[in-house]
Amino acid sequence: MKFSNFFSPTLKNVPAEAEIISHQLMIRSGMIKQSSAGIYSWLPLGLRVLKNIENIVRDEQNKAGAVELLMPTIQSADLWIKSGRYNEYGKEMLRIKDRSGREILYGPTNEELITDIFQSYVNSYKDLPKNLYHIQWKFRDEVRPRFGVMRGREFLMKDNYSFDLSEQDAIISYNKMFEAYIKTFLRLGLIPISLRAETGPIGGSLSHEFQILAKTGESTLYYDKDLEQIDPTNIDTKKLQSYYAAVDDLHDQSKCPIEKNQLKIAKGIEVGHIFYFGTKYSEKLGAFVQNNKGENVPVHMGSYGIGISRLVGAIIEASHDDKGIIWPLNIAPFKISIINLMIDDENCKKVADNFYNQLSSKFDILYDDRDCSIGKKLSDNDLIGIPYQIIIGKRDVKDNLVEFKVRQTNESKKISIDEVINIVSKKINL
Ligand code: 5CA
């Protein structure tokens, strides 16, 4: 992508309405634009990141055996009346009337709709277990939308729903998702802390939330420090669930079961939440299957959510410096930028064009060919957090050199032009 063709309106100044660093950086780097309170347009740079996160989440869901579908954002009130949640959900639900006066709503979650889909087609235990997910926009009319995409009113969620014959089977499905969540967050370069949680309006008896560690996080977590030591190649769900972990309002030091030197206190951001709620929805919405004795029994269900748009902000909270965002490689909107500092110089242009032609078929490249100051080019590339930067200047090019900068460490070194392709390809394919 040539920067001159791209649409990435960067801002130098911190916008007044943005209280936290991720919100400030997302606006300054031209990732999002507020449309109304808690509702955002995703500009091209933001959309690339959102899609990259979405794809990692999708990949781990597929690997765990979940199957993707897509349900609408607008739902009929009828199913919610049947489940009893239409009144219960309160003002957070956006309620709309269509032209014939029928009550519809913008879905805040999908337990009702998926249960209805399931019950329309499945009626034998032989078809179980099933685990269905979608990645779709939700709307919750939050009292105080704030912190940009972290607490929006419209936000993107991956939500899935498991269907099992018995509680025992449902717990197996639940633990499979637990493991998939840990894998997902590790792949996103985050440290996930899993905690037993309240079930709230979703209901049920068993629930965990997943918080990721970030100094600027909203919740204070108290947890066994071993929880941070996760071996990604061997995730022991039982062990992880046995560690002590609690958010501050549930932590009571006098009742804390672990030694002080084992207890860690850190700030976190909730990025995922999973629930087992048994037959709460299946009974009300008629999701019954025949068991091997020919009896009709309600299926046992769980639901599992990841806040995909929230993750964009959360990752920035966990990974930035005073120059801007530091994207982990697999989430970065572009992996490499080729920064031509002297667009009018023939030699610089030739070298830059050549790199672009060779690299753009293999990687996502941002070619900074804009007609603007050297200072703006360098600061913009740091602000938007491109992991590897090839900086091409007039004097270096004469010596057959370019500058190679690693955004993670901000270290840069001069390397020979002939080595560039080799070095970046190796770094990215690691
Ligand atoms: N039905 C269940 C699981 S599918 C559910 O809705 N769970 S939830 O309410 O906990 O939401 C799941 C995740 O969505 C949360 O962990 C959080 O990461 C994200 N989320 C919830 N509310 C918002 C919001 N207002 N803005 C951004 N993300 C949100």
Image (spheres, helix red, strand yellow):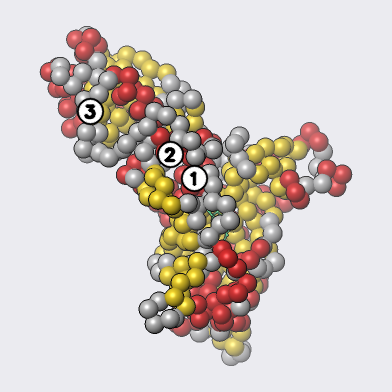
User: Position of 124 compared to 410: left or right?
Assistant: right
Q: Nearer the viewer, mark 3 or mark 1?
A: 1
Whether residue 423 appears in this view of the structure is no
Whether residue 27 appears in this view of the structure is yes
Residue drawn at 48 percent across, 52 percent down? 38
Mark closest to the chain's N terminus, 3 or 1? 1
Identity, as a three-letter code, of the amino acid under mark 3: Arg
Residue to which mark 1 is pinned: 148
Residue drawn at 59 percent across, 71 percent down? 301
User: Position of 142 compared to 371: left or right?
Assistant: right
- Residue 152 image position (x, y, % from top left): 50, 52
Between 313 and 142, the one lying in front of the other is 142
- Residue 138 image position (x, y, % from top left): 47, 61
Q: Which mark is residue 224?
A: none
Between 102 and 385, the one lying in front of the other is 102
Q: Quadrant of ligand 1?
A: bottom right
Mark closest to the chain's N terminus, 2 or 3? 2
Cβ–Cβ under 8 Å for marks 1 and 2: yes
Q: Secondary structure at mark 3?
A: loop
Residue to which mark 2 is pinned: 26
Above or below, 92 against 12 in this view is below
Q: Which mark is residue 370?
A: 3
Identity, as a three-letter code, of the amino acid under mark 2: Met
Quadrant for the N terminus in the image: top left
